[in-house]
Image: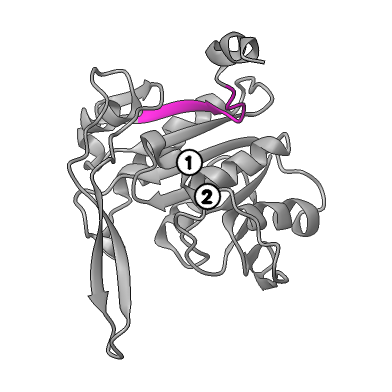
């Protein structure tokens, strides 16, 4: 089995090493192609206004001066020569739950793999608390990664399907198990801007989110990780809202 490992936190991110270690539990034919720098929040973006640079770190380890999507495309079109059997993206430093998947470079790398017809899985490690930065612990992902991925290896993936895995912010021995759940949705309506001035007097801004309201019930990825489970969520690239097709067509 040939596996391509990528991420959005960059080639030197601790979570990438975790993903590579998980991949090596399934195969010795593991390749790493990841962004040279952190690309969190890059979504499914491509670099179209400047050239991409590919740097070789060793025989099967490369970095790309672009986004996670660029990295997957470079891996498929330039580095590997032939398609891999599996793409693992992550392990992201922080959750990719609910509507996070629309912003996430980690999930978008898996989306690009799915577009190419490759079995693709995104993995993220939930923070124990906000502001941990590089102190995020990946022990849960390290212990549960193989268990979460292995059942997916011989499962049929429909065209355009990918899987999003989130590991809870718990010690490995406190995780209750694995739950297959849908994508949740949070209310980020009360966003705000934190405004400061730089030393030259020019303003700069940070986005801030507060008062987040999560999906009710216990059947989404949000509640699964909050309840102490690894959340496994099948996603699909087809974003069509089919319930509206008939009513919308009637307006034309």
Query: Is residue 238 on the magenta stretch?
Result: yes
Which of the 4 quarters of the picture holds residue 68?
Answer: bottom right
Residue 29: x, y in percent? 67, 49
Going from N to C along the chain, the mark reached first, 2 or 1, is: 2
Q: Residue at x 66, y 52 (%)?
A: 72
Residue 241: x, y in percent? 55, 20
Quadrant of the rendering where the N terminus is positioned: top right
Seen in the picture, residue 222 relative to 90 is either above or below; the reply is above
Which of the 4 quarters of the picture holds residue 247?
Answer: top right
Label 2: few (<14), some or many (≥20) within 10 Å?
many
Drawn side of residue 81 relative to residue 224, left or right? right
Give the overall secondary structure of the magenta segment.
strand
Label 1: few (<14), some or many (≥20) within 10 Å?
some
Seen in the picture, residue 39 relative to 187 is either above or below; the reply is below
Residue bounds of the magenta highlight: 231-240
Q: How far apart are marks 2 and 1 (CA)?
A: 6 Å
Q: Residue at x 28, y 54 (%)?
A: 137
Residue 112: x, y in percent? 65, 43
Check if mark 2's residue and mark 1's residue have beta carbons within 8 Å.
Answer: yes
Outermost residue, right side: 81
The residue to which callout 2 is attached is 43
Could one spot residue 205 in this view of the protein? yes
Q: Which residue is drawn at 60% across and 37% down?
A: 120
Quadrant of the rendering where the C terminus is positioned: top right
The residue to which callout 1 is attached is 102
Please tell me which residue lies in front, 70 or 121. 70
Residue 117: x, y in percent? 72, 34
């Amino acid at each position: 089995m040939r596996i391509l490992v990528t991420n959005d936190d960059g080639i030197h991110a601790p979570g990438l090493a975790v993903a590579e270690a998980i991949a090596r539990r399934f195969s010795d034919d593991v390749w790493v192609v990841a962004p040279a720098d952190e690309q969190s929040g890059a979504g499914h973006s491509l670099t179209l206004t400047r050239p991409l640079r590919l740097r070789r770190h060793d025989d099967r380890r490369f970095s790309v001066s672009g986004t996670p999507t660029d990295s997957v495309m470079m891996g498929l079109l330039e580095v590997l020569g032939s398609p891999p059997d599996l793409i693992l993206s992550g392990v992201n430093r922080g959750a990719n739950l609910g509507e996070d998947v629309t912003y996430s470079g980690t999930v978008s790398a898996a989306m690009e793999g799915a577009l190419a017809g490759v079995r693709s899985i995104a993995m993220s490690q939930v923070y124990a608390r906000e502001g941990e930065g590089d102190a995020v612990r990946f022990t849960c992902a390290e212990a549960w990664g193989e268990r979460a991925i292995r059942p997916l290896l011989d499962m049929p993936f429909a065209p355009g399907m990918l899987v999003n895995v989130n590991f809870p912010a718990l010690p490995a021995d406190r995780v209750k198990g694995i739950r297959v759940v849908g994508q949740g949705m949070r209310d980020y309506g009360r966003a705000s801007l934190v405004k400061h001035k730089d030393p030259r007097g020019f303003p700069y801004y940070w986005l801030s989110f507060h008062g987040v309201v999560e999906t009710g019930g216990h059947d989404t990825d949000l509640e699964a990780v909050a309840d102490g489970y690894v959340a496994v969520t099948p996603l699909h690239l087809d974003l069509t809202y089919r319930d509206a097709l008939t009513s919308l067509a009637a307006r034309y």
